[in-house]
Image: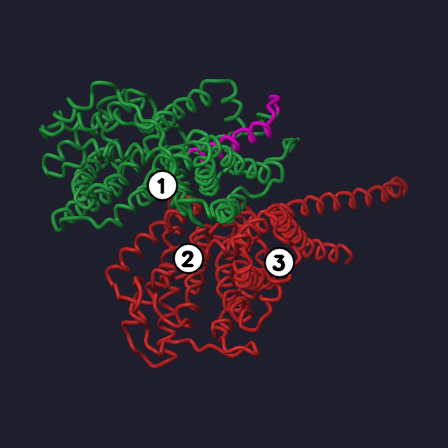
Amino acid sequence: MTIDLRRIALAVIAPLLAIVFSLVVTALVLVATGDPVWSTAKAVLDYGTKPNVLALTLNQGTVYYLSALAVAIGFRMNLFNIGVDGQYRLAAFTAAVVGSSISLPKPLHILVIVVTAMLVGAMWAGIAALLKATRGVSEVISTIMLNAIATTLIAYLLRKVKYDVAGSNNIGTKPIDESGAFPGIDLVPGTDVKVFGFIFVAIIAGILYTVVLGRTRFGFDLRATGRSQSAAVASGVDVKRMVVYSLLISGAVAGLVGMPQLLGGSTRSYSLDFPTGLGFTGIAIALLGRNNAIGMALSALLFSFLDSSSIILDFNGISKEIVLIMQGTIVLSVVVVYELVRRYGVAAEQRRVSRQLADEQPATPTEVPA
Amino acid sequence: MSTSTVAPVPPGSAPSGLRGRLPTSGVPLAMVSIAGLVLLLSIVRVITGADDLTSSGTAGAALALAVPIGLAGLGGLWSERSGVVNIGLEGMMIMGTWGAGWAGYQWGPWTGVLVGTLFGAAGGLLHAVATVTFGVDHIVSGVAINILGLGVTQFLSVIAFEGVKGAGESQSPPLDDIATVSLPGLRDPLLTLEQHHWFLVSDLAGIVRGLFTSVSLLTVLAVLLVVLTYFVLWRTAFGLRLRSCGESPVAAESLGVNVYLFKYAAVVASGAFAGLGGAFLAIVAGNGYREGQTGGRGYIGLAAMIFGNWRPGGLAAGAALFGYTDSLQLRRGGESVHALLLLLGVLLIAGAVLLSIRGHRIAAGVAVVAGASAVAVYVQTDVVPDDFTTMTPYVATLLVLALASQRLRMPAADGLPYRRGQGG
């Protein structure tokens, strides 16, 4: 019982230590550049807790969370889906094209768009899955290549379907009809910035993630394969099939990443300025949240809080890119701290066992004669 | 793609013992492959009239574009030969571009090269601390370094370049160029030859003129570094020990090799190579640091290394191929790549014949279909959109991985965690 408590404590302490460490690093950077640390932190906190900024934080957090979920599904299987980035962009683009070319009653229209996105995401991840399962190609390399291919493919197709965005040099897809809009909600009082209705989809996805991975046969097989492939094979798991399934599911979830913006944003189209790089942020958040549904939710909110509240820094004459430094430091330090904590845990366990054995030692000889 | 371009060579030109080995092994084989490739390109040029396929401009641009990819690839090679996967090359390269831009405008281009290299090496050191000392997953650390590299440079840009003349929040002031060198007495006669558009002669003249005139000193340095890498890693005791850490660190340890030290050296060198590649981008290829200048070349470098089967020669071939496709894009790419489709189609069909003789029916079938469709696209269209040219390196890498993954052999302990004394 006490061991469990200690384990939980270790699990919570690690990310906290990493965050504290990166705060210290950020503070040092501020000191080095001659900026005041306390007033900067205060400005960020004040600005970040304004109602409209909080709503933006929730919106961005929704997107980050979906991305982290997609990455985490691969992680649990010991697969590194770096391709979430390409998957969600291609998915969002295709869904935007499909969604704008049809018109259907409201719920159905949304459903078609979302399903299209999930299928495209799964398909793009499926290429990496097939290469891995049939040819043994590392998914890390193939998804990096697929990301780059997706970038150029989208650039090409975007010019093909070109639809000029009014009053700018931006080009995008034709806007999706009103029937495809995913309604926003007034979640944060005191502001008229609406929170993406998709936040509920993200929450449901998080619950499904926990239940499917933790409470089903499929989830057990997936985790078992991630822990030890040979053990999984011995217990009758078809590893190749699991590779394909988990990457397909990861890709399908990645397909959701672009949806809050596409269906809940004001333009409802995929244009040149559609957010990029969310897949990489997802990796960082999944690492920080340790593939745990709640942990990732908190991490996603932390990252989006840093993003949306850092806008104020530019007004104070500090580059808001310092947030990138902080996020990068968090990722690197969190994995280092996890490793250190793991080593400490193993060492503590060894000490405990050896102590136990030492205590039992005197008892053994007396038992043998009896 | 390239496997099929070179696959027909071995049976005729080399003893049968070499059959099945990758063509990058052995200097004679490489030379035969290059000669065959030039011949093929010149045939295709005459048939299609796409003169830029072998023009001196294309050759020169290809070389310049291959250098940063090759340097990143060398970085990957050093690191992975010691058993550390380095996906953070992109981030280290970004640091290199920034370091070169920052130091270059203040103290001249060569200082820029040095500082860019050092910045890259600093990124490498961070990767080494995380992966070797703390045993963090190599890919996780690499991803974090890519995020950090981007963040640090963007942050520093605002501080360092604000208010500097000719600079901005996302770019350094323009930099002085590094001197170029030429083999004497080649430029004009070769130009005359090239302009005649004779079969083979003009092609050779164009390629030689592109590769040996007006070449930046940094390019020369990069080519020398490929040779040097081969020499150090495969012909010295240091290199043998370094590679043994990538093959079996436990065995290396039992022979008294300080595995941690070698891994550190290799990963720091890896970062330095990537940083040098970044410096090349900022100083020679571009005119100063710009945000997003690397454009994923760290990743392409990694791809070139895998393409080259974790060998310097193969890596150089991969970098050259990627540089070549990139350069075609600059010089009426639609037309040139369109012409290459014909070459690709014919080679695939030839490869299919070879495969069917060897009894690989399914592979032969796939190759025939692919070759026929390449020829069909060639006949049906006039130009290939630029975006597809951009895609070429990535698709080529995927194809090589898919078709030749059984022949590729990465260092046996590449990417695996290692702790001192774990062998017991």
Is B305 displayed left or right of B202 in the figure?
right
Chain to which mark 1 belongs = B
In space, the residues marked 2 and 3 are separated at their CA atoms by 28 Å
* Mark 3, secondary structure of its residue: helix
Instruction: Identify residue for label 1.
Output: B401
First in residue order: circle 2 vs circle 3: 3
* Mark 1, secondary structure of its residue: helix
Instruction: Identify residue for label 2.
Output: A276
- Residue B333: x, y in percent? 21, 44
Chain to which mark 2 belongs = A
Instruction: Identify residue for label 3.
Output: A40
Q: Residue at x 82, y 43 (%)?
A: A355
The correct choice, above or below, for B102 with respect to B28 in the image is below
Is A23 displayed left or right of B73 in the figure?
right
Q: Residues within 10 Å of mark 3 (few under 14, many from 20)?
A: some
In the figure, the red chain has which letter? Answer: A
Quadrant of residue B4 within the rendered picture = top left
- Residue B244: x, y in percent? 52, 26
Give the magenta range. Answer: B254-276
Q: Identify which amino acid the numbered label 3 is placed on.
A: Thr
